[in-house]
Amino acid sequence: MECTVNWTGALGTRSGMGFVAETGSGHTLVMDGAPDAVKPENGGLNLAPRPLELLLAGTGGCTAYDVVLILKRGRHDVRGCSVKLEADRAETDPKVFTRINMHFTVSGKGVPAAAVERAIAMSHDKYCSASVMLGKTAQITTSFEVVEV
């Protein structure tokens, strides 16, 4: 796996904190920093997600992928899956994630709560590389609901 990240500055200037990442699979994404009221030249323009927001989003994508795949392999009629992640960070540098809560909403026809609980646990404990890595610094909790459609 590889990725190249290039500093773009702000709209082609060499100020600002914009970055473009190109992934090994050929996709691009944009990142930016928060504006800095004290030293504007050191801040971003709030034009794109922060890098750590993308880390959190990637973790959500990783675990949701696992949950859907595990449920489908179990021949459950899953029709939708979303996960809302809420995280706290350390007060001092490095400001790692210290707490992450993942709330899953799984919809389908006759999907047993026990199957969803098992899929989430399997993702969290075994398959989701991102959440396993983040679990080294953060307490990760999960909750879920099943919606019949």
Image (cartoon, helix red, strand yellow):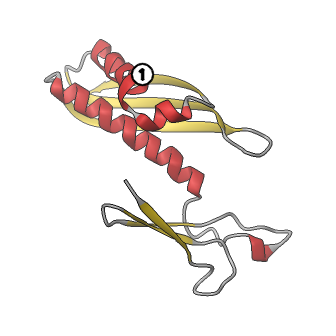
Q: Is residue 6 visible?
A: yes
The picture quadrant where one finds residue 117 is top left
Q: How many marks?
A: 1
Residue located beneath label 1 in the image: 125
Q: Is residue 18 above or below residue 124?
A: below
x, y percent for residue 72: 18, 29
Seen in the image, is 136 located left or right of residue 95?
left
x, y percent for residue 82: 37, 38
x, y percent for residue 105: 38, 31
- 42 and 146: which is toward the camera: 42
Q: Give amino acid for label 1.
A: Asp
Q: Is residue 6 above or below residue 144?
A: below
Seen in the image, is 33 located left or right of residue 122?
right
x, y percent for residue 74: 17, 21
The picture quadrant where one finds residue 79 is top left
Question: Measuring 35% from the left and 36% from the top, which residue is drawn there?
Answer: 64
Tell me the quadrant of the picture where the C terminus can be found. top left
Seen in the image, is 76 located left or right of residue 139?
left
Mark 1: secondary structure: helix
Question: Measuring 67% from the left and 37% from the top, which residue is drawn there?
Answer: 88
Q: Is residue 82 visible?
A: no
Q: Residue furthest top?
A: 114
Question: Measuring 35% from the left and 29% from the top, which residue is drawn there?
Answer: 127
- 146 and 32: which is toward the camera: 32
